[in-house]
Image: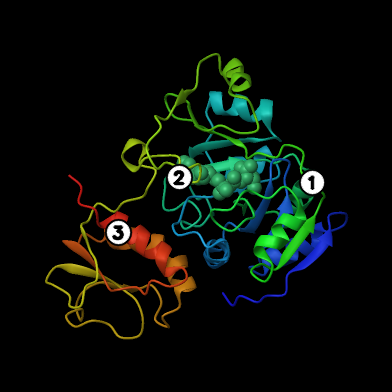
């Protein structure tokens, strides 16, 4: 993304049409939810999602929350069972996010869910957020609208302070009411409290009629990365071994390429190029779907060409390194 964008700020009243058009064009729109301001992008547009990670300066691709306007839209992207439906009907719209199995044919990009089979879904209660979601008509991924590592914004001015010149539009709906992020519940066999937040756990437990389990705390675990990879498969990992920084392709390997110059040995191999032009935003947008495709191709290993470490390259390399960790 070219930083130095002209970031417009408009009042929330009557902003929905403008915001929806901006999202439709692949733009980044900050808007108020009742918890914190979110930075929205079209969840079905991998390129827009890649720009979002870039604008936040996230050093890794954490999966994002898909925001929708109603339960019907939620059911198009996620599968509900009796328990999760009860939570949705009781607490939505509101400060609760449910992690659910992805629905088949879910149009949300693999980048937004970081390649996982699950998806985080929320119907926010803020009228401005709901108007935008209704006007747009598709799911919107929205992490908190701050630079990675900064505190979550509760006013439009906080958003401007962090993201001016990096995003297209800020919808100003005044200070938010809740002020902390949504509570995240993983709807697994045992329901898990993945992140405490704006909805008290007791309220959720009362509706479920059971206690929420809590992920054990780990050294270095932050709220942005609440799960350890081994425990919940919170990170997508290919089954095929991954070999990084390949300068030459070995027999039986598939190639995940980057840039215009393909390495020797790949003439008869299956090759997917993250970005022929060497564009890191395009590469990020393609990363998870290409890894999946090569993983399904039955090669002995996936060799990966070096990816530069600047801009989104840091997050791409973080993900590739995790994918390359040997597993049994
Ligand atoms: O209140 C909120 O939830 C705000 C507003 C804007 O809606 N959004 C927000 O998003 O806090 P973010 O990206 O800052 O936090 C999303 C959290 C991350 O910790 C991420 O790891 C987790 O949700 N998450 C998303 N999808 C997940 C999944 N499939 N499985 C487990 N955790 C997931
Ligand atoms: Mg955040």
Q: Residue at x 36, y 58 (%)?
A: 319
Q: Residue at x 53, y 50 (%)?
A: 64
Mark 2 CB lies closer than 8 A to ligand 1? yes
Q: Residue furthest left?
A: 251
Nearest the eye: 98 or 219: 219
The mark found on residue 175 in the picture is 1
Q: Residue at x 17, y 78 (%)?
A: 248
Tell me if residue 80 can be seen: yes
For marks 1 and 3, the one nearer the N-term is 1
Q: Position of residue 159 (x, y in %)?
A: 70, 57
Q: Is residue 202 left or right of residue 191?
A: right
Q: Residue furthest bottom?
A: 261
Q: Secondary structure at mark 1?
A: loop
**Residue indicated by mark 3:** 321
Instruction: Determine whether 121 is above or below 113 in the image.
Output: above
Q: Is residue 174 left or right of residue 226?
A: right
The 10 Å Cα crowd at callout 1, few under 14, some 14 to 19, many 20 or more, is: some
Q: CA distance from mark 1 to mark 2?
A: 26 Å
Q: Secondary structure at mark 2?
A: loop
**Residue indicated by mark 2:** 225
Q: Position of residue 252 (x, y in %)?
A: 14, 68
């Amino acid at each position: 993304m070219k930083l130095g964008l002209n970031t417009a700020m408009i009042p929330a009243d009557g902003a929905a049409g403008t915001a929806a058009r901006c999202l439709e064009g692949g733009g980044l729109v900050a808007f108020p939810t009742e918890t914190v301001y979110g930075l929205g992008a079209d969840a079905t547009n991998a390129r827009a999602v890649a720009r979002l990670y870039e604008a936040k300066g996230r050093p890794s691709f954490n999966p994002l929350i898909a925001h929708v306007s109603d339960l019907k839209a939620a059911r198009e992207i996620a599968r509900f069972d009796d328990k999760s439906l009860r939570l949705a009907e009781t607490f939505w719209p509101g400060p609760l996010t449910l992690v659910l199995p992805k629905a088949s044919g879910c149009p949300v990009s693999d980048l937004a869910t970081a390649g996982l089979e699950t998806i985080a879904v929320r119907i926010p209660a803020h009228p401005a957020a709901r108007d935008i979601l209704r006007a747009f008509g598709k799911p919107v991924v929205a992490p908190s609208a701050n630079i990675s590592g900064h505190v979550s914004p509760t006013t439009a001015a906080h958003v401007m302070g962090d993201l001016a010149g990096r995003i297209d539009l800020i919808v100003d709906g005044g200070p938010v009411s809740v002020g902390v992020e949504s509570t995240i519940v993983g709807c697994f066999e045992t329901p898990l409290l993945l992140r405490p937040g704006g909805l008290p756990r007791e309220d959720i437990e009362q509706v479920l009629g059971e206690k929420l389990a809590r992920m054990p705390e780990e050294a270095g675990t932050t709220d942005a990365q609440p799960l350890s990879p081994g425990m919940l498969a919170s990170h997508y990992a290919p089954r095929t071994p991954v070999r990084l920084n390949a300068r030459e392709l070995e027999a039986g390997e598939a190639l995940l390429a980057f840039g215009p110059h393909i390495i020797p040995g790949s003439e008869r191999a299956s090759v997917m190029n993250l970005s022929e032009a060497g564009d890191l935003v395009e590469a990020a947008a393609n990363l998870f779907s290409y890894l999946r495709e090569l993983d399904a191709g039955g090669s002995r290993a996936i060799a990966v060409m070096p990816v530069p470490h600047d801009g989104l390259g840091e997050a791409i390399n973080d993900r590739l390194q995790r994918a390359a960790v040997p597993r049994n």
